[in-house]
Image (tube, grey):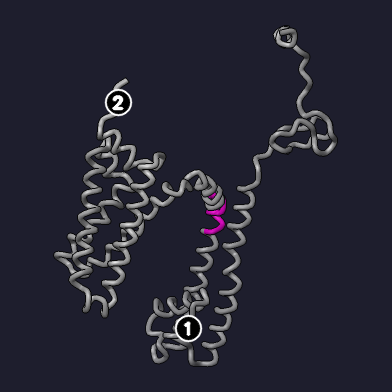
Amino acid sequence: MDKPGWRERLYIVVFFASTPAGRRFDAWLLLIIFASLVVVMLDSVQLYHIRHGELLALLEWCFTAIFAAEYLLRICIHPKPTEYVFSFYGAIDLLAILPAFLALLFPAAQYLLVIRVTRMLRVFRVLKLMPYLSQANFLLIALRGSRQKIIVFLLSITTMVIVFGTLLYVIEGPQHGFTSIPTSIYWAVVTMTTVGYGDIAPKTPLGQAVATLVMIAGYSVIAVPTGIFTAELATAMQPRRLHRTCPTCRKSLHEPDAAYCSRCGNALFPHQPPTGKDEEKRQD
């Protein structure tokens, strides 16, 4: 059997963490990504930018060169380059280097380099956490199961903030900061979600009374989506039940590996007499 070529060996190292070399590659890549994020964040601090701006810029271009070389390497060694380029990780790898070149035309674009933090998703491969991500299927099942209830809830909340916002616009008016219905709706959303920036506040007694109702309603509605999702999640995490009707008591749901009814104790499956082949196996 022919030994794999250098491209096949590099492909295993770069794209998989199932080998020691692959784990080391991903570990070093994560370290470089984290270091590049630190450089970007430090460069956004005015004091460090003034004192060490040139050094930080040089380090950033070094990181960009490393990521660009890694991106080209992945394209070169992948059996289907276009499949990698248009994949999720391929798009993320490209976005990790594009802002550096955009910064040449638009200096403010350099802070888009924090997009590289999404590449830290590779940590799941290094730490071998991918098998545990199968548990996320329960979350997806719960979201799908509660989709209609959550949509109804969001429509109800939308109606409430529109009504309360319009009321405050009529009651308070532009002289108290409620210059338009959208601005008043913004206040209603901020108040109902209990954020309360304080940039707009009612001044009249009637407006404050309505604001009190909005705040009480906000505390009431916070628990609604949590309860809906929790109930669906609990249902999704329950083990699949065996749909087998007991011939005696007619109970229909049992444990997945049940052979006898948990209510009356009778067998769920009729006893099958041994066949000739079974007798031959016993004799053997």
Q: Is residue 271 above or below residue 25?
A: above
Q: Quadrant of residue 83?
A: top left
Q: Quadrant of the N terminus?
A: top left
Q: Residue at image x 50%, y 92%?
A: 204
Q: Is residue 19 above or below residue 2?
A: below
Residue 145 magenta-highlighted: yes
Query: Farthest left residue?
Result: 105
Mark 1 crowd level (few <14, some 14–19, many ≥20, 10 Å Cα): many
Mark 2 crowd level (few <14, some 14–19, many ≥20, 10 Å Cα): few
Q: Give SS at disc 1.
A: helix
Residue 236 position within the rendered picture, expressed as x and y whole percent measured from the top left = 61, 48
Instruction: Name the kind of residue labelled 1 in the image.
Output: Leu
Q: Residue at image x 50%, y 43%?
A: 131
Residue 3 shows which numbered tag? 2
Span shown in magenta: 144-150
Instruction: Name the kind of residue labelled 2 in the image.
Output: Lys
Residue 168 shows which numbered tag? 1
Mark earlier in primary sequence (1, 2): 2
Is residue 212 left or right of 119 when viewed as pictured?
Answer: right
Main SS type for the magenta part?
helix
Residue 207 magenta-highlighted: no
How far apart marks 1 and 2 lie (CA) works out to 76 Å
Q: Nearer the viewer, residue 104 or 211?
A: 104
Residue 271 position within the rendered picture, expressed as x and y whole percent measured from the top left = 79, 20
Q: Is residue 209 above or below residue 117?
A: below
Is residue 128 left or right of 80 when viewed as pictured?
Answer: right
Q: Residue at image x 69%, y 36%?
A: 256
